[in-house]
Amino acid sequence: MEPFIGQICIFGFNYAPQGWGLCNGQQLSISQNQPLFALIGNTYGGDGRTVFNLPDLRGRTPIGMGQGPGLSNYVWAQKGGSETSTLVVNNLPAHTHALNAYAEGPAGNVAGPKDALPANTGGLDPEYRTSGTLVQMSPQGVGMTGSATPFSNIPPYIALNFCIAIQGIWPQRP
């Protein structure tokens, strides 16, 4: 079965068959590929006078153009998305963290904070405890945590070979 010019197919082998081009953004001559250029122009790059580019689907997930019910609108050849995301405060749900301290007192049983928590003490030394009943302290006493390290946003995948038909049947409009 002969493909339509401009048809994109996924192949399970790692080369473009005869009459097809890899969807890797490669540049083609307009004069040698006029039918395909007539369909896609320089939508995917090129100067539009002597050369044009094929779509580059390396590392990209195709998405249907248009707008499904309750979904975003995607226009032909639109690019978007990111392989990684950085979580920022605005992405977090509202939440709290507890800061605990030992309720027994008044005296602590160690002089420094290493491996200990603040004690309920009115005296000068020691001010920390290593055992006892924990109670929550003021929420203002909790410091910042985390970092701005990006994390992967890619679902499980398998890399396949996307190719575009350079030769074939002209796709007639309905």
Image (cartoon, rainbow, N blue to C red):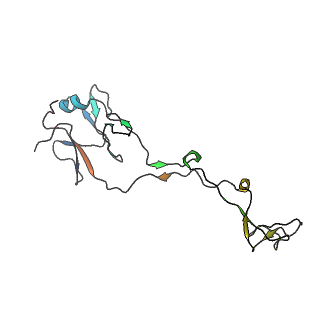
On screen, residue 105 versus residue 12, left or right, reads right
Q: Please tell me whether residue 138 is drawn above or below residue 39 in the rendered image.
A: below
Residue 13 rendering spot, x and y as whole percentages: 22, 54
Identify the residue at horizontal 74%, vertical 60% (top origin): 137
Spot the residue most to the right.
123
Asked which quadrant contains residue 143, the reply is bottom right
Q: Nearer the viewer, residue 59 or 14?
A: 59
On screen, residue 47 versus residue 93, left or right, reads left
Identify the residue at horizontal 21%, vertical 47% (top origin): 16
Spot the residue most to the top.
49
Residue 132 rendering spot, x and y as whole percentages: 75, 74
Q: Quadrant of the C terminus?
A: top left
Q: Nearer the viewer, residue 28 or 129?
A: 129
On screen, residue 88 versus residue 111, left or right, reads left
Judge whether residue 160 can be spotted in this image: yes
Q: Please tell me whether residue 4 is drawn above or below residue 125 in the rendered image.
A: above
Residue 22 rendering spot, x and y as whole percentages: 25, 44
Identify the residue at horizontal 17%, vertical 47% (top origin): 17
On screen, residue 13 versus residue 134, left or right, reads left
Residue 39 rendering spot, x and y as whole percentages: 22, 30
